[in-house]
Image: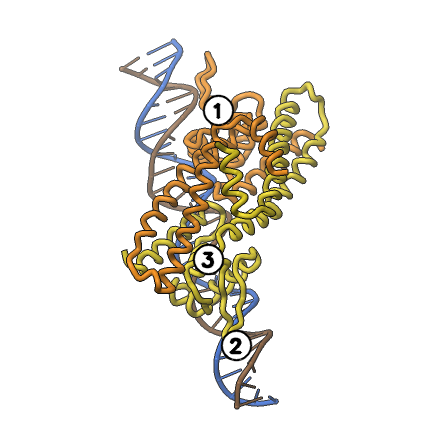
Chain colours: A yellow, B orange, C brown, D blue
DNA sequence: TTGAATTTTCAAAACTTACTGAAAATATAG
DNA sequence: CTATATTTTCAGTAAGTTTTGAAAATTCAA
């Protein structure tokens, strides 16, 4: 397989993969393109490579920057802006975990705390089922929250070597 | 807060939460409803509680069954079918992990293996960047695959007590 | 069998999300 | 400044996804 074809397949699969994780296809493709590009790219480069409009590139790049996955790079003597992605996959994963934890897990735990204060007789089976479900999710959610905090601070080597042993 | 309101909030947030994870809103809501329902429900119950059509309930229930999260229950002497969800959250999480691993992670690893066979001079910086990215993702992906296998086999207590200690 | 109850299917409609492209805003070089 | 290059915005449109609802299929009691 030629590089051009392999790159295309990678970009397109990464896009499809993203859609299973609540990430829009184009944003994932731009990220993939930057991951396999040794040098920073301009918006025009991305428009050309992915066949998408300027507005589309612009909005998705901004979103990738918000996620902390892409950076603006200013090349000396160049008028245009360039963009580059973090290449260390372990750092990328940690960054995504950090953001999703903040955006999704933490608000969910807050909601569950509130829902646990529901009024009603704990002998009533509907109340009981509700509290059991909410309580169960909360317990696992808190555990995940703490575990992810530790992971975010960890080094890849630590993860790969220690965790593997534990899980054996 | 009254139970009715708390249940509604739970169901609606669970639906919103699902959409961030590539799961359709209604499917997540049906799942949430079944989680907080002590007894099995019929399709008509769900239509009434969630204000959705029969076809919609039917298709999403089938999908939840495919995911292994919901079961058909036949009550003796009843013509209608009833449905119930697994209530143990740890089991639910393991089941979801198992399915997503099979549906997403494994095919992705296969693709990466194929992409690594790309032709070309490894001194070429484009080839190198491509191989580095693909190799890096593969390494972490394989690690995740093994770790998740172990998790799927684990008991919740094991997870909660042992893993916490490790991560301290 | 028959027919009433129930479930399943799927084309069309409704809804949601993503994308385009041109205009407005901003930045920079001369 | 002024002119030009570049980036940003966003209303309108396109594309994609979900939902409806009624017809077809299935199930089952009598």
Element class at badge 2: loop
Which of pointers 3 and 1 indicates the residue nearer the eye?
3
Q: Which residue is mark 3?
A: A31
Q: In the image, B109: left or right of B153?
A: left
Q: Position of residue A147 (x, y in %)?
A: 60, 39
Q: On residue B142, which mark appears?
A: none
Instruction: Answer above or below: position of B41 versus D21.
Output: above
Q: Quadrant of the N terminus of chain A?
A: bottom left
Q: Position of residue B83 (x, y in %)?
A: 48, 24
Q: Which residue is mark 2?
A: A76
Q: Which residue is mark 1?
A: B83
The part of the image, by quadrant, that contains residue B98 is top left
Q: Residue at x 52, y 24 (%)?
A: B41
CA distance separating discs 1 and 2: 64 Å
Which of pointers 1 and 2 indicates the residue nearer the eye?
2
Q: Nearer the viewer, residue B45 or A17?
A: A17
Q: In the image, B42: left or right of A115?
A: left
Q: Residues within 10 Å of mark 1 (few under 14, many from 20)?
A: some
């Amino acid at each position: 397989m030629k590089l051009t074809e392999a790159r295309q397949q990678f970009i397109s699969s990464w896009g499809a993969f993203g859609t299973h994780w609540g990430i829009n296809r184009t944003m994932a493709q731009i990220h993939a393109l930057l991951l396999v590009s040794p040098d920073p790219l301009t918006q025009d480069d991305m428009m050309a490579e992915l066949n998408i409009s300027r507005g589309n590139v612009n909005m998705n790049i901004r979103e990738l920057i918000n996620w902390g996955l892409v950076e603006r790079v200013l090349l000396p003597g160049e008028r245009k802006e360039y963009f580059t992605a973090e290449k260390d996959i372990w750092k990328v994963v940690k960054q995504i975990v950090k953001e999703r934890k903040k955006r999704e897990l933490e608000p969910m735990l807050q909601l569950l705390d509130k829902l646990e204060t529901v009024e009603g007789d704990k002998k009533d089976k509907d109340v009981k089922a509700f509290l059991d479900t909410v309580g169960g999710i909360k317990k696992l959610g808190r555990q995940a929250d703490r575990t992810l905090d530790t992971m975010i601070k960890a080094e890849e080597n630590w993860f790969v070597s220690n965790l593997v042993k534990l899980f054996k």
